[in-house]
Amino acid sequence: MNGFDFDSCFAETLQNLRREGRYRVFADLERDSHSGVHAYDHRTGRRVTVWCSNDYLAMGAHPDVIRAAGAALERYGAGAGGTRNISGTTHEHVLLEGELADLHRKESALLFTSGYVANDAALSSLGRFLPGCVIFSDELNHASMIEGIRHSGADKRIFRHNDWRDLERQIASVCKYRPKIICFESCYSMDGDFAPMEAICDVARRHGAFTYVDEVHAVGLYGARGAGVAERDGLLDRIDMFQGTLSKGFGAIGGYIAGSRDAVDFVRSHAPGFIFSTALPPSVVSGIRAALDQLKEDGSARAALARRAASLKAKMLANGIPVLPSPSHILPVMIGDAALAKAITDRLMAEDGIYIQPINYPTVPRGTERLRITPTPLHTDEDEDTLIAALVSARGAFPRWTELTAAAQPDIHVSMRENADAIS
């Protein structure tokens, strides 16, 4: 053989993933749009209940959203026809950007093909073109934010998770004339905790820093109109730029930023991830607009999710399921081993028709592998009881689960009222 053995390298790398229990197997699911939480699994030939969807409010199955997307598909066709700068800007895109700006009480908004692209494009452009910029990033920020900061080439400082005092110590050490960006999330997707947003905004004000917050796991879910944690906490005017997704609270696909007219235009004019990407299909955009309109006017889905999350967590605690004390809608059930997490989720699927994907390294650190359970307003009491019984049964079937989490388990006894209050 001549040269490098590519096939052997690929095969060995994949085998290592399998050996560690980190090899990912795709489900072959056919979602039931009438139920919103069930799907047909083509691998097993059975109907399953999905407990790990990011469509937190099940807006992807909302009749108004489906009707709006269908009507736009008939009107506009399947695709946008080009990038936004060429032929891909339709009236639907213009309307949605105006509505997203209004949601966050900002002057302007800009759509991207995904939340990942939005973070990468915005942060890389801000950091690259602001002269001498320093970016201060929470240590648990999402990979898309990390990539955006890396691509910017700007100096970066990593502050301890949710530690505004560490942030202040670091930002005070930088020349006051250099532009500074504080980059953090409002709700962290793997632990389900919230950022101390007001304290971080206070640090930004004292040091003249630009605040950039990722509300991906909060838009649609928090605040009177669903604008996120900043709206819930009365801080909309203290955030310079919001980044959000359209794939979670709004149940579709895409991402966006919202901020001042000039700041958004700055990103629009410089970001390769925007300039060179084909625009979202108008049918998708129309469906998002319907979801956004629904969630701005009606908070019943948010309230229903709050009740379901609080109820499910209470039952987990009562039955000895090691759930982290997250005050949000995200319920991380700790396992502590990649192979064991996969074995548990395989059992849940085979024995109970429950679909949950294990969360392993590199998404979370080794030794903190978990099941990331996300209830929706459309899960029923029966669905909930079935899940709890299945988790209890799995805990009995895998004694090592108890052994791994017993020593490491933090104090998980939190107020259910606090959980419900936080999410509503």
Image: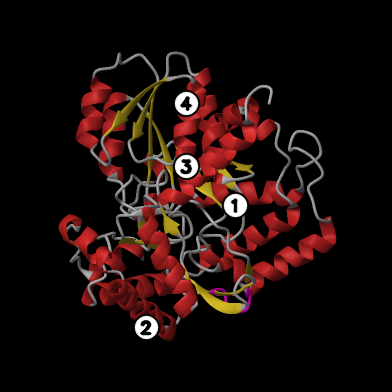
Q: Are marks 3 and 1 in contact (CB under 8 Å)?
A: no
The foreground one among 339 and 197 is 339
Q: How is the image coloured?
A: secondary structure
Q: Which residues are magenta?
A: 31-37
Calculate the distance from the C-alpha at mark 2 to the C-alpha at mark 4. Answer: 45 Å
Whether residue 93 sits left or right of residue 14 in the image: it is: right
Reading the image, the residue beneath label 3 is: 242
Residue beneath the point at 63% across and 36% down? 7
| Residue 2 among magenta residues | no
The answer to whether marks 1 and 2 mark residues whose Cβ atoms lie closer than 8 Å is no
Label located before the other in sequence (2 or 3): 3
Pair 2/3: label in front: 2
The residues tagged by marks 1 and 2 sit, at their Cα atoms, a distance apart of: 39 Å
Secondary structure of residue under mark 3: strand
Question: What residue did someone put label 2 on?
Answer: 385
Tag shown at residue 150? 4
The secondary structure that dominates the magenta segment is loop
Residue ID for mark 1 = 99
- Measured as percent of width and height from the top left, residue 36 is found at 57, 74
Distance from Cα at disc 4 to Cα at disc 3: 19 Å
Q: Say which amino acid is labelled 2.
A: Asp
